[in-house]
Amino acid sequence: MKTKNLAVMFTDIKGFTEKTSRKSRSEIKEMLKRHNESVLPVVARFGGRLVKTIGDAFLVTFESSTDAVLCGVAVQNALAELNKGRAKDDTIDIRIAINAGEVSVAEDGDIFGDAVNIASRIEGIAEAGEVFFTEAVYLSMNKNEVPSSEIGYRQFKGIADRIKVYKVLKEDPVKPRSAADSACADEPSADEVRAGGAKEKDTGSEGASFSGVGGIAGKIMDAFKKAGMMRDVDMEDGFGKKVRINDDGIHVVKDGKEIRIDKDGIRIRRVKDGEGRD
């Protein structure tokens, strides 16, 4: 049995058991057919290898962490299009989780090891329509191609160490890309956006919980209002930077990017000329 360093992806359909309990066998077969036809071509396009199918779930490996995450985004986008106009029982909503590390590869192609086990655990907390991944993936991927948000540390059954978890940010679209495409997407760096959108609670070993950037921003805004310091400010300097401060928060537009700080956290998006002044 040989070992390799790979990115490991788990996917599964959320609520599959509940949905199929109300369907005939032919309807279940049709749903799985639509699922496979939507997911597997995308996996192949990004160089993924389907290791095995486990019921409604896929276990896939990639040589590249970046390709694994971009594949996850492309899969979610494809399913979002597929679900348009369909009744709730006919939608296919999947959870995607990715980890990276050393795995043992059996002769039949199956894989084993902690990297696989951790990916499976992350999939258990992933949200439908989202792409969750570990710090191991974050450190090895191209951060310029995938805006991400740190969710926080999680402790999983059977895993000795707490695992830091991230997810792909949706505020700034990821530029579509195939595995063979070497052009870098023109997106904000992960350093710019990784603090934003982290609304999930992070429970540490002492049980303390944190409400994330949004909660901190909200408290700062409330303190400014009580002190009478949150006044309407709308100004523009000589270098193309526009700043607006009001009850909605702080908005800064500079070099085609808008940064918003409010009770929902920190969000960054690209804007066209004239945008970002709502």
Image (cartoon, rainbow, N blue to C red):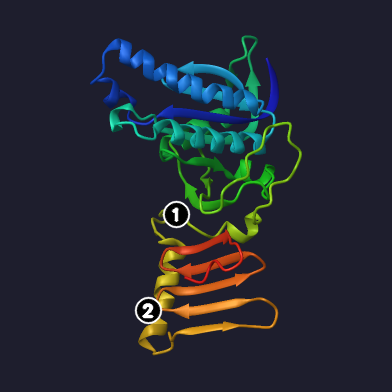
Taking the image as shown, residue 3 lies to the left or right of residue 37, namely right
Q: CA distance from mark 1 to mark 2?
A: 27 Å
Taking the image as shown, residue 110 lies to the left or right of residue 38, namely right
Taking the image as shown, residue 101 lies to the left or right of residue 250, namely right
Along the polypeptide, which appears first: circle 1 or circle 2?
1
For the point 54% across and 53% down, the residue is: 149
For the point 40% across and 74% down, the residue is: 219
Residue 275 is situated, as x and y percent measured from the top left of the image, at 55, 66
- Residue 83 is drawn in which quadrant? top left
Residue 242 in the image: above or below residue 189: below
**10 Å crowding of disc 2: few (<14), some (14-19), many (20+):** some
Helix, strand or loop under label 1: loop
The answer to whether residue 240 shows anywhere in this view is yes
Helix, strand or loop under label 2: helix
The answer to whether residue 48 shows anywhere in this view is no
Q: Do residues under tags 1 and 2 come within 8 Å of each other at their CB atoms?
A: no
Residue 218 in the image: above or below residue 85: below
Q: Nearer the viewer, residue 55 or 83?
A: 83
Q: Which mark is residue 204?
A: 1
For the point 62% across and 9% down, the residue is: 108
Q: Amino acid at mark 1?
A: Gly
- Residue 155 is drawn in which quadrant? top left
The quarter of the picture where the N terminus appears is: top right
Residue 100 is situated, as x and y percent measured from the top left of the image, at 62, 35
For the point 42% across and 39% down, the residue is: 125
Q: Mark 2 — residue?
A: 222
